[in-house]
Amino acid sequence: MRTNAQEFATAQAIMPGGVNSPVRAFGSVGGVPPFLVDAHGAHVTDVEGKRYVDLVMSWGPALLGHSHPAVIEAVHRAVDHGLSFGASTPAESRLAGLIAGRMGGVERVRLVSTGTEATMTAVRLARGYTGRDLIVKFAGCYHGHVDALLAAAGSGLATLALPGSAGVPAAVTAETLVLPFNDRTAVDAAFEQYGQRIAAVITESAPCNMGVVLPEEGFNAYLRAKTTEAGSLLIVDEVLTGFRASDAGYWGLTGRTEGWVPDLFTFGKVIGGGMPAAALAGPAQIMDFLAPLGPVYQAGTLSGNPVATAAGIAQLEHATSDMYANIDARSLQLQDELSAALNAAGVDHSLQVAGNLFSVAFGTSERGVHNYADAQAQEGWRYTPFFHSMLEQGVYLPPSVFEAWFLSDAHDDAAMDQIVTALPAAARAAAT
Ligand code: PLP
């Protein structure tokens, strides 16, 4: 039997950092990442045969649990008919219809393969549709590795952004304004200064990539009003929250009840059921600006791939109201247990909650976390011993304090018990 350490060494010798997506390298918590060979229900298993209760769930896609029988069966059926056609299929319209049926204001859907492609295309479409160049994003929001959106926070209000990655030309992010999240004054000032040049505001429906940060009451609606007033588009990124926070994503908990819709939504993760599928969606008037009808080009060899589409359809069809109620209840249970364990160990913290998505932030009980600066100011180092204690006890948490914890419909009493049993020792580790 090979060990995780051996596999990591092999991987590092052939792939940069030994991974194909940076966070998997455990850079922020250190140590050797488990190399996984199996995922079923609420569990993953590594090459050493150790089984973990999973709270990463492939970073969100596994809403029903890993290898849900309905999803696996749909994939098997699709595979039997071929892996990729590079031509249209009836199933694409079915998946698009499922998305449109649950979200407000969606008349057209374009399927792509990754969330990054979805946000990249949304930005291009917004620019093409409005004839404007500037994009507003919020510090700490992640929208995939789109050049224009890999921008670090500018120093203060309406400062044109600097690239957040080598290889991104300053000229590209110079067209991106980075504002503090939850800050209406900053939004006002940006629109006052640049209003007529702003093509779109893009925001995570509820930010989950600086840890979870709750949009303050009415903040998203405010962005809707501001963008409408200025003739800019509002892009609501539901790649992570979509069809997870509710049957209509985090928008289902806000816009649906408040009575507003964005111009464009982006989706990923859940809509692929664990296979590569993502989408952007919105009204025909904007979406039909995409090729072949309109002047904004976008394409993909594997877009609407029949196997991915089949997985996505099966997952959405099984995402019932009972399932959401179950995940919501499990989330509340885990939040309570986590807080109780940390309190018992005397660890100051706040739970960051948006719907059924949550994360923990250390040393933040007084102010909470409302934006990226708050998230960065926390005692993040406490997460490392906490994480490793949980891992040791067979619970696989996101390997960064800046990530949400993902539950699924497969997290049953036994899985929850294992997590809850592990919490006190981890909380004590975080206290030291
Ligand atoms: N948008 C959000 C909110 C995300 O969380 C992510 C990925 O985590 C993306 C976009 C990018 O999606 P992908 O990793 O599929 O490119």
Image (cartoon, grey):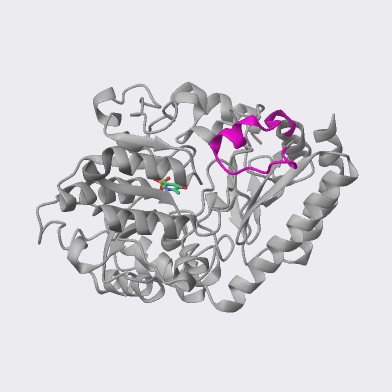
234 sits to left or right of 211: left
Among all residues in the image, which is located at the extreme right?
344
Residue 152: x, y in percent?
42, 29
Using the rendered image of the protein, determine whether residue 300 is visible from the camera's viewpoint.
no
State the residue at coordinates (53%, 26%). 10
Residue 146: x, y in percent?
33, 38
Q: Quick check: 199 above or below 69?
A: above
- The question of residue 199 being in magenta is answered with no
Q: Quick check: 39 above or below 189?
A: below
The quadrant in which residue 286 appears is: bottom left
Residue interval drawn in magenta = 364-382
Q: Nearer the viewer, residue 211 or 423?
A: 211
State the residue at coordinates (45%, 43%). 185
Residue 323: x, y in percent?
60, 73
Q: Nearer the viewer, residue 221 or 107?
A: 221
Q: Quadrant of the C terminus?
A: top right
Q: Nearer the viewer, residue 54 or 366?
A: 366
305 sits to left or right of 418: left
Q: Quick check: 142 above or below 173?
A: below
The quadrant in which residue 28 appears is: top right
Q: Quick check: 374 above or below 105?
A: above
State the residue at coordinates (33%, 52%). 113
Residue 301: x, y in percent?
22, 51
Q: Nearer the viewer, residue 288 or 37?
A: 288
Q: Quadrant of the N terminus?
A: top right
